[in-house]
Amino acid sequence: MSISRLLLLPLFALLLSACSQEVPPPQSLAGVAAASDLCVIPELALDEHNDNPLFQPQTQTPLKALDPLLANVRARQTLSLNGDWNSIVDQLGVGDASPLLRGGVGENESYGPHELLEYSFKGQHTLQVPGDWNSQQESLFWYRGIVWYQKEFNYQPPAGKRVFLYFGGANFAKDVYVNGQLLARHKGGFTPFNTEVTDYLKAGKNAVVVKVDSMSGADEVPTEYNDWMNYGGITRDVMLVETPAAFVRNYKLQLAARNELTPNSSSQSSKGEQRIKGWVQLDGHKGEQSVTLNIAEAGIRKTFTTDASGRAEFEFDAKLGLWSPDDPKLYRVDWLSGDDQLSDDIGFRHIETQGEDILLNGEKIFLRGVAMHEESLLRHGRAATAADADAAIKKLKDLNANFVRLAHYPHNEHMVRAADRAGIMVWAEMPVYHNIQFSNPCTLASAKRQYSELIARDQNRAAVILWSLGNETPESEARNRFFIAMAEHVRTLDDTRPLTAALLGFGGMEDIGRYIGLLLAGEENALVGMLTSPEAPTITINDPLGDVVDVLGYNEYFGWYLSGILTQEMRKQGLDVSEDQVRELMLQEMEKFTIVTAFNKPLVISEFGAGAKQGKHGGPLEIWSEEYQARVYQQQLKMLRNSPALRGLSPWVLKDFRAPYRLNTDTQDYWNRKGLLSETGEEKMVFKELSDYYKALQQPRLEVAQP
Ligand code: GCB
């Protein structure tokens, strides 16, 4: 069939149906369903099943619900439990109680020479905490499942104090045992949790055992089917945190949203003052108690009285220097209440949207960013330390960035704190990624709880300017309802930051396909070319999720996936086109495309990119080459100038990252190669491309304008 036949074809009907929600089951699943039809499973009475407990691990129930999160733990007296932990890989999940294991691995029993006990931590296996197991032992590289961790330590519980066991994060489900008792269970790989252990520790030797299961489940947030490595393990810091009997558990200390300022309250413009608004929550108090807030540098000293639940809410005017990327000013803040004293470093700034603008402290800003996964630039594996965070910040500075999208889940607290100090604005995100069970109330409950944990940890970080609800979620009624509920939840917890979400960028496919098709037809047949002279497409973002969020994120891969997909589709329709032709035209024409939105809201292109293997060079059409990747960026950056609502960029992605999704063993080899940096941190050509572009934007006044 000739290319000009394209004009007659119903355009890309097939392609679009593939993007709708009616996704047919993958071939393999369809096969399983067919096979099971052959076998009719008889209904058995319960006692006919062989469910003798001898061979069944027993379900354990924790003694306690989780305690509310303690904020700012590193500013307290702590005992780090980082370091080597003994480990047992439990691939079959047999370590919970069964007769041969008595009360189960969590009991951490020892045994004599004549006693049979089918587990022991006394072997040679250890894992470093914080750290993922996959990058620590070759044999665990692909392992997904359960690992038991054990740490023994000497401790003298301090008299009159309370002690909490705090985990910065461990992926995914955790059962936490202290001296043989299952105290707490937590699910979610990227948010912190703590459990009070005051009554469970003893003087001398103590033991903590944690059962970590890296498998999340289809009803969880996230599921296991993601384009990143499901790193398992206790991936973040673990510590004992000591507090007085009554202490400051958490607080929020931020500027009131500017739209909340009443005509009577002071505003920055009238008296050079801002309005601080917040709350403080005590734990262990007896009835009402006083709490003092001291910000010595700003001459602030205020005493509040809590209500009987230990909470005090407050609002007052203050003269403060505002936090911004140019001047990331942090104030030393001290809380004093009874025997408790807690210090923090907090920046104050306004972040809001107005029409298509993002305003920082009332001024228009443009977000010069990049997206990143939580992988270390210093070694392979999950980033976990302050040094990892500093290395990432340094690269962001080299890139002339003022913004980072911490994709696709909450990153560790070191990173957010480092961004606060360095003046890098942060997009923080919940791993509501692709298809999760949007209509399952338990899935929604999990997402909400994880968001509560993230906000409890990061609500005082000036750097965090956007809460993202999720990434690339296909449109459906259930999805829309899910996000409406999530948005309400997040806004109830924090109304001082705009909400965003990265929308799925298939919207323009039909128009782009038609346009490229017509150009190809014109190339082949001069007459067709003269008759058609197509207009470059305008892609309109109209996903109803745009109504829910304040800032629209949009992921688009013109020049990478789209070129490949369109070629396949044209060929399916019998057209004789090569991928080279489509890629070349796409790259040439892209700068004429325009992305607009159906919402009067700011737009951040939250992803675009192309894969390249560092060191691979080739012609301008050779994919996986550094040249091709750089060319995609050049054309993207030209194209994005056309988008009137564009207020920021976070191309995909800072560094090549581990991705079992990526099966091209030649170039990818289980790495997603869209990094500006290789997996070991070497810059690809595109790094300079983007850093030069951002440098140009950084010039005075251009900083706040569009590119
Ligand atoms: C996306 C996803 C991201 C993937 C990326 C890619 O749209 O949001 O998680 O890794 O594309 O490389 O395909």
Image (cartoon, grey):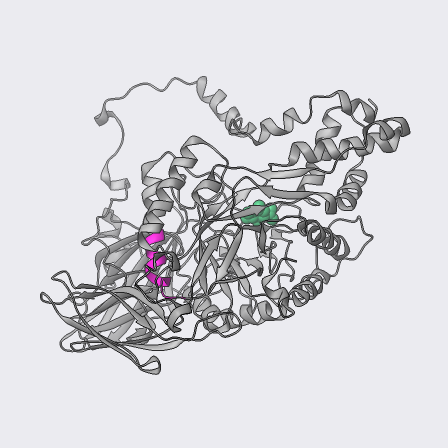
Percent across and percent down for residue 90 are 38, 51
**Furthest residue to the right?**
526
Q: Nearer the viewer, residue 353 or 401?
A: 353
Residue 638 drawn in magenta: no
Q: Is residue 516 left or right of residue 698?
A: right
**Furthest residue to the left?**
287
Would you say residue 60 is visible in this rendering? yes
Percent across and percent down for residue 419 are 48, 68
Q: Nearer the viewer, residue 273 or 700?
A: 273
Q: Nearer the viewer, residue 116 or 567?
A: 567
Give the main secondary structure of the magenta stretch.
Answer: helix
Q: Is residue 93 left or right of residue 17?
A: left
Counting labels gives 0
Q: Nearer the viewer, residue 485 or 673?
A: 485
Image-quadrant location for residue 316:
bottom left
Would you say residue 83 is visible in this rendering? no
Q: Which span of residues is magenta-colored?
A: 450-461
Quadrant where the image shows the N terminus: top right
Tell me which residue sits at (24%, 59%) in the image.
68
Q: Is residue 433 left or right of residue 75?
A: right
Percent across and percent down for residue 218 are 41, 39
Quadrant where the image shows the C terminus: bottom right
Residue 451 drawn in magenta: yes
Vertical relation: 444 (above or below) 347: above
Percent across and percent down for residue 522 are 85, 31
